[in-house]
């Protein structure tokens, strides 16, 4: 996910909570995109080259495999409306129902992708996970690591959600859209610094 920052109160209109309708009308006049947390706009600022590469690889992988199928991949140009009248711009979504050519909001995404950034990881892992899980159409939420090959995947299983962590070498399977591929394909062209396993241990934990 690209870095977000809550915008400062710039005028009287932004010093009080905005309604969803007010936000959507206000956003039309802005030169950049904003998310909406139910209270105030949050500016979407630029990401890293690594983020852009992962997002581009994701688009290439899915558009190729979904060609000729009813589902379609969209990048972060389209927003979705989630619980609490929040507006989000995921890094990628798959939709399996028709989308009007002039649409700016997708109402029924099936699979949602976020590329994790240090500044937004907690929001993506907790806040957005809850928002996306509360949306009936969503069947899978995939969070892609940015500093290594890896993903965290939530999948709907009836009235509950399963949780899985995919390491390098894993296959990302998405049966709800009839697609699977090696997770490493999304990291093609990226080179990562060697990692010490200690990086993943909780603070204070040592190896015996």
Image (cartoon, helix red, strand yellow):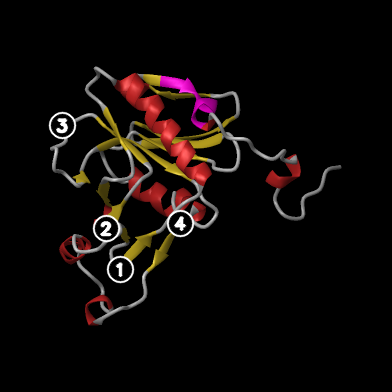
Instruction: Using the rendered image of the protein, determine whether residue 192 is visible from the camera's viewpoint.
Output: yes
For the residues marked 2 and 3, what is the alpha-carbon distance in whole angstroms? 25 Å
Q: Nearer the viewer, mark 4 or mark 1?
A: 4
What residue did someone put label 4 on? 3
The quarter of the picture where residue 110 lies is: top left
Label 4 residue SS: loop
Q: Using the image, determine if residue 46 lies above or below residue 163.
A: below
Q: Mark 2–mark 1 contact, CB under 8 Å?
A: no
Q: Which mark is residue 98?
A: 3
The quarter of the picture where residue 146 lies is: top right
Q: Earlier in the sequence, mark 2 or mark 1?
A: 1
Q: Nearer the viewer, mark 3 or mark 4?
A: 4
- Tell me the magenta residue range: 180-186
Q: Nearer the viewer, mark 2 or mark 3?
A: 3
What residue did someone put label 1 on? 40
What residue did someone put label 2 on? 84
For the residues marked 2 and 1, what is the alpha-carbon distance in whole angstroms? 13 Å
């Amino acid at each position: 996910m690209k870095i977000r920052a809550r915008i400062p109160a710039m005028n009287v209109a932004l010093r009080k909570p905005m309604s969803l309708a007010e936000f959507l009308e206000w956003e039309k006049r802005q030169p950049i995109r904003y998310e909406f947390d139910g209270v105030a706009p949050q500016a979407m600022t630029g990401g890293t080259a690594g983020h852009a590469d992962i997002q581009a690889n994701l688009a290439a992988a899915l558009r190729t495999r979904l060609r000729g199928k009813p589902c379609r991949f969209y990048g972060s140009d389209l927003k979705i409306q989630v619980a609490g009248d929040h507006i989000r711009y995921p890094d990628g979504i798959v939709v399996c129902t028709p989308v009007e050519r002039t649409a700016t909001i997708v109402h029924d995404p099936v699979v949602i992708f976020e590329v994790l950034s240090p500044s937004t990881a907690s929001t993506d892992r907790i806040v957005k996970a809850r928002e996306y899980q509360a949306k009936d159409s969503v069947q899978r939420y995939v969070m892609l690591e940015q500093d290594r090959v890896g993903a965290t995947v939530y999948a709907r299983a009836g009235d509950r959600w399963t949780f899985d962590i995919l390491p390098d070498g894993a296959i990302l399977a998405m049966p709800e859209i009839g697609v699977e591929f090696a997770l490493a394909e999304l990291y093609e062209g990226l080179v990562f610094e060697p990692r010490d396993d200690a990086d993943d241990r909780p603070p204070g934990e040592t190896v015996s």
